[in-house]
Amino acid sequence: MTIVTVGIDLAKNVFAVHGVNEHGKADLIKPTVARKDLHDMIANLPPCTIGMEACSGAHYWAKLFQESGHTVKLMAPKFVSPYRMGGRKGKNDAADAAAICEAVTRPTMRFVPIKSIEQQGELFVHRTRQGYVEQRTSIINRMRGLLSEVGITIPLSPESVKRHACLHLDKLSHYCNHVIADLIGELERLDEKVNEYDRLIEKMARQNIFAQSLMKAHGIGPITASAIVATVGNVHDFKNGRQFAAWLGLTPGQYSSGGKARLGRITKNGDSYIRTLLVMGARSILSLAKKRNDALSQWALALRERKGYWKTVIAIAAKNARLCFAILKKGEDFDFQLHEKRNATMQQSIANNRQNTAQ
């Protein structure tokens, strides 16, 4: 019989393959397939649906199998786990492949968009920059910790650390002086690399029409715009803006039962990098809100008055996520002036309702 669905458990060198026919019977069970043999084996199959977990190498294999005429779908690993027959104790490569084969056929399954080589290249830049930022933070923390051992405390901000460390350098003994001078040199090198990648990301954002549209929104800079475009593309895999915000983990988790709605903290699911960038942009919007008179700033200030700082920041980030979805969905047809006008009308309506309630 013809294989119609295949589940592949990806790995570095040894893969597991599970295929079923049109009657749901497993006709292809290969618990150990060498890396060099995987492509030939899949290419020799008739066109079918292939499911894989979105992990390291998944996008490479997806594009390779698509060239052979197959339909490839990627899924988040957490959505595949419930279909593993053996549960947590029965986890192995063969069971994972069978679970993937079952999960990919579910009509309600949510899939991960397959990234193009251009998107992967842009994400390479973002990941490398983020790595340099983390190394720089580690160096700063190490420097502050070492100096505190000899009674020298310096400010926390990265801009002040190097300057204050240089001022105290002559007061240190031979070995201490050598170590701190070495750390200052490493910090300068990392600053240069981060600035270099910042310029590269700005160049990428200027060359992308979608990123240029996103940067028109408040709180969306080149890094955020470029990261969103490289990660989700044209967002056609999301039904609406709320689903996109939920995918980023900016919506509250639900613990509802018996007809009673219970909302918890934000889920923090999805891409933590984009969520962090949106939250940083939201903090910037809130800090400048007192100096602006637009509808978004007035809404943010009123919300902070009622809900506090951090809930307001998350609300702004979620609002910006929905706005990004609308911009990418509509493309050049998105009207920023109409959007601002609707925000102003909504803000006025909310203010009128509160005034009527107070009276």
Image (tube, rainbow, N blue to C red):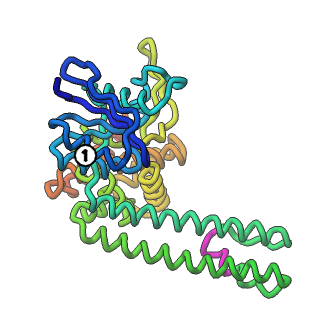
Residue 221 belongs to magenta span: no
The x, y position of residue 117, in whole percent, is 27, 59
Magenta range: 157-163
The quarter of the displayed image where residue 136 is located: bottom right
Which amino acid type corresponds to the residue marked 1 in the rendered image? Asp
Q: Is residue 358 visible?
A: no
| Above or below for 238 versus 228 | above
Q: Nearer the viewer, residue 260 or 257?
A: 257
Residue named by callout 1: 40
| Above or below for 107 versus 250 | above
The x, y position of residue 112, in whole percent, is 31, 42
- Tell me what residue is drawn at x 27 percent, y 71 percent: 206
Quadrant housing the N terminus: top left
Q: Is residue 150 left or right of residue 36?
A: right
The x, y position of residue 326, in whole percent, is 24, 48
The x, y position of residue 176, in whole percent, is 81, 79
Q: In this view, does 272 lie to the left or right of 23?
A: right
Residue farthest along the bottom direction in this orientation: 170
Residue 162 belongs to magenta span: yes
The quarter of the displayed image where residue 277 is located: bottom left
- Tell me what residue is drawn at x 50 percent, y 41 percent: 306
Q: Is residue 8 visible?
A: yes
Disc 1 is placed on an element classified as helix
Quadrant housing the C terminus: top left
The quarter of the displayed image where residue 223 is located: bottom left
For label 1, the crowd category at 10 Å Cα-Cα, with few meaning under 14, some 14 to 19 and many 20 or more, is few
